[in-house]
Image: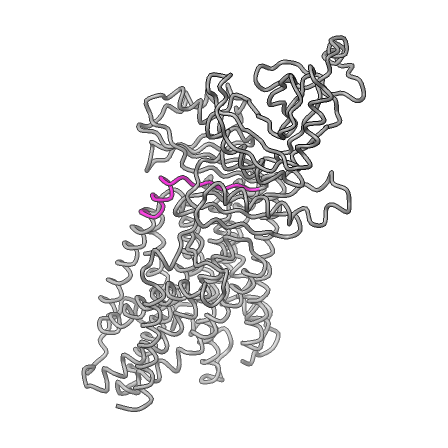
Amino acid sequence: MERKLIYKVIFILAVIGTCIYYTFPLDKRINLGLDLKGGMHLLLKVDTSHLPEKARADAADRALEVVRNRIDSFGVREPSIQKQGDDEIVVQLPGVTDRERAIDIIGKTALLEFKLVSADPDKLKEAIEGKAAEDFELKYATEDNEPLLLEKQALLTGDTVADAQVRFDQSSFNEPAVSIKFNAEGAKKFGEITAANIGRRLAIVLDGKVQSAPRIKDAIPSGEGIITGRFDIEQAQDLAIVLRIGALPAPMVIEEERTVGPLLGQDSINKGVKATLIGGAMVFIFMAIYYLIAGLVANIALILNLLIITGCLGMLPYMFPGVSATLTLPGIAGMALALGMAVDANVLINERIREELALGRNLKAAIANGYNRAFSAIFDSNLTTLIAAFLLFQFGTGPIRGFAVTLTIGLMASMFTAIVVTRTIFELLLKFGWLKSFPMLKFIGETKLDFIGKRKVFYVISAVVIIAGLVVFFQKGSNAFGIDFAGGQLQEYSFKNPPQVDKIRQLLKDLDLGDASIQQFRDNPKAILIRSKSDKNQVLMSKLREVFPDEDVQMLRIEHVGPIAGKHLKGKAFYAIVWSLAGILIYVGFRFKHINFALAGVIALIHDVLVALGFLVMTGRQIDLLSVTAFLTIAGYSINDTIVIYDRVRENMRNSRKMSLAELINLSVNQTLARTVLTSSITLFVVLAILFYGGEVLSNFAFTLVVGFVSGVYSTVFIASPLVLAWQKKKVKL
């Protein structure tokens, strides 16, 4: 055996071994994202608008430390708490689904104040009538709604609290309460306050609410006190945590929230696995039947491609400490695109080998020439998509960045498996005499269609479809966008039996949520989806359980996006798409040495994205982050198709110098038509499986991909290729 071949085999085996080591056990090497396993994602904004200018500088850092300590005391496994920008904190809590409790413990400012209560009934009466004295404020006790007139100036704050623990108040029927203990400074001051105000009431105020207002009977030099307020045990425990750790330096606003319940997370995993298995099986069966031996080799490459992706994800924490290997729904989208491009590379190589055999080459020469001729198209298409993925990572948000990372790994894996692994297998088969022929089926024969001649007809068809979609898009306005971009709240609940929608609609009206929309799913009528502009989840949940007492109502997911976060997400998504298209334009223009090709290719990409967007809004679906991920997937896949044709045009220019550019483009499109149709059809197997079996969460994503991939084939043949002629003023040289 040749030394070069031995080295290649050793290298491939080393890659396989390394990837197996970093892949298994899978549940320990790769974490599932919150959208798959359940949990909470929060984007918190620290409101420093009311702080003195000098105090703002480190407010977010101090808030980060307080939030981290609170979550540690809360007992969440493997939380992620990170500062983002100057005044934002991103919190991820795997497995946490008690939304209200988590939000309360994280976001509670926990400003504890002790204020004296006025004993003057006349002043209290005036305050109730709206005429409170300047140094006083009217408050109502949380226990019994008793009106109290408090001195505005706090005598003591929670800064001096050294400890807080749950205890049971014997005087209030053994109800949970929180005992507090001051440090030395606080104890001294508390003793002085109580000694000087015996007989008066001292209000205990937490975040502006009067928890209790006991009367001071004696001086309390011990520095200990008790906070009552009709707490349940959980509320008392949480209050003790926040008081022990200390108050936030400034209030925090939840700009974005995504809570996925364990039922939906497990359902997403189950449906995602099912869809992947069905789609993957269809791809494997087709490749094995259509390409026979070459198809089996391609299937080995596809399996290894998935292994390399999971292995590299498992390697990330070791290569980049602090970075976790997390698989999310957008990440799965990146894997789908990478798998499609891996299939495409193998189809391209096999079709090239078929052409070489048709020219009378012997088997060894045909395989060598097939790989050599396919290399430039594979390299250009993958590198173009890699540039787009890099720019997506730079300018995208969390989900889009996850897509970019997985796509990048998948693209490098597909190039390695398609170019190195499959060729090595063929060389081994030839070396040992096990490969005597290269049989393949052929569904699409040689075509001689005039694609260029009919180009204006297809321009009109595309224009009509795009304009119709844009008209509907602009008519819908903000309603075309999901809560990711428009803001608002999405709530999904499951029932034991299909609920009566009329009852739910009436319940929403009673809660002043009459503008909310209700969606019931065909594939799962036991679940409902409610979209609204208001955050009344806890009230709604309790009311649903009250109206449907025997239906075991469960929260599946809650998504809340504030207007500022929605605007931010929309801007980031827009720039991610724009910069990716710009990167593709520059590279294609440089690689093919003519701007005509680059402009035509990018216009075709924009065409595909607009067609997908149009069908999305015309079918009543909303644009969300997963839709944007689908647009990016479409762009990556479409440019891959286009570059394959451009590469063939470049090759034919060298071999047929007397042909016009129109004739060259027609010839190239016909020569690559079988590969274009085959690749897109095979990839559609996976996408259709996701659409039909992937569940409601992935429905928008899969639908957009189906439309985009079909449009991609159409635009590659009827838009991108003919458009090269649109700006032709002189003979193009490549």
Location of the C terminus by quadrant is bottom right
Q: Residue furthest right?
A: 134
- Residue 133 visible in the picture: yes
With 254 as the anchor, is 132 left or right in this view? Answer: right
Magenta stretch: give its range.
256-271
- The picture places residue 348, in percent across and down from the top left corner, at 36, 72
- Residue 481 visible in the picture: no
Point 59% across, 53% down: residue: 572
- The picture places residue 425, in percent across and down from the top left corner, at 27, 79
- The picture places residue 114, in percent across and down from the top left corner, at 67, 27
Q: Quadrant of residue 183?
A: top right
Point 31% across, 70% down: residue: 301
733 drawn magenta = no
Q: Nearer the viewer, residue 461 or 409?
A: 409
With 258 as the anchor, is 51 left or right in this view? Answer: right
With 594 as the anchor, is 19 left or right in this view? Answer: left
Q: Is 359 situated above or below 73?
A: below
Q: Is 608 situated above or below 37?
A: below
- The picture places residue 135, in percent across and down from the top left corner, at 79, 22
Q: Is 394 situated above or below 5?
A: above
Location of the N terminus by quadrant is bottom left
Q: Quadrant of residue 699?
A: top left
Q: Nearer the viewer, residue 219 or 303?
A: 219
Q: Main secondary structure of the magenta part?
A: helix
